[in-house]
Image (spheres, grey):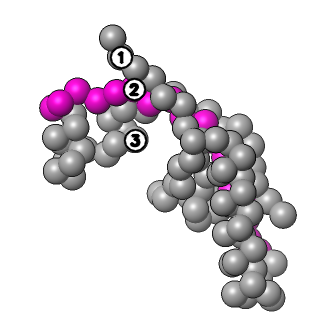
Amino acid sequence: MQMEITLWAYQVTPGSDHNLYFGEHEADCRRAALEQRAELKEGDPDDDELGTMALYVFVFRSLSAGELVAVLNGEASPIETCAVDRKLVGLIAD
């Protein structure tokens, strides 16, 4: 029997899914994203061009032993290997 786990994620770089930050709860991701946005604005207060960050809910399935070996050896992406669903649920902005 495959176990499924639901996790939340937001874009670390606005407009790009290359780096995602994951959390167990939606509130955790929203809080982390808002903290990150505040730090970025503090570092460059004149930059008004910070785009929105996508917020997703993911459903992951457990990995087989072979899939886990491939992920650990860098031969496969954990997201591509075990994500069974991903939905955009909102955008984070100030």
Q: Of the residues shown, which amino acid type is indicated by label 3? A: Ile
Specify which label sits upstream in the sequence, 1 or 3. 1
Residue at 71% in and 67% down: 35
Q: Quadrant of the C terminus?
A: bottom right
Specify which label sits upstream in the sequence, 2 or 1. 1
Most distant residue in the right direction: 94
The secondary element bearing badge 1 is classed as loop
For the residues marked 2 and 1, what is the alpha-carbon distance in whole angstroms? 6 Å
The image quadrant that residue 48 belongs to is bottom right
- In the image, taking residue 17 as reference, residue 26 lies left or right, namely right
Mark 1 in CB contact with mark 3 (< 8 angstroms): no
Tell me: residue 9, above or below residue 38. above
Q: Which mark is residue 2?
A: 1
Magenta stretch: give its range. 49-66
Most distant residue in the top direction: 1
The image quadrant that residue 87 belongs to is top right
> Residue 21: x, y in percent?
54, 55
Is 55 contained in the magenta span? yes
The secondary element bearing badge 2 is classed as strand
For disc 2, the marked residue is 61
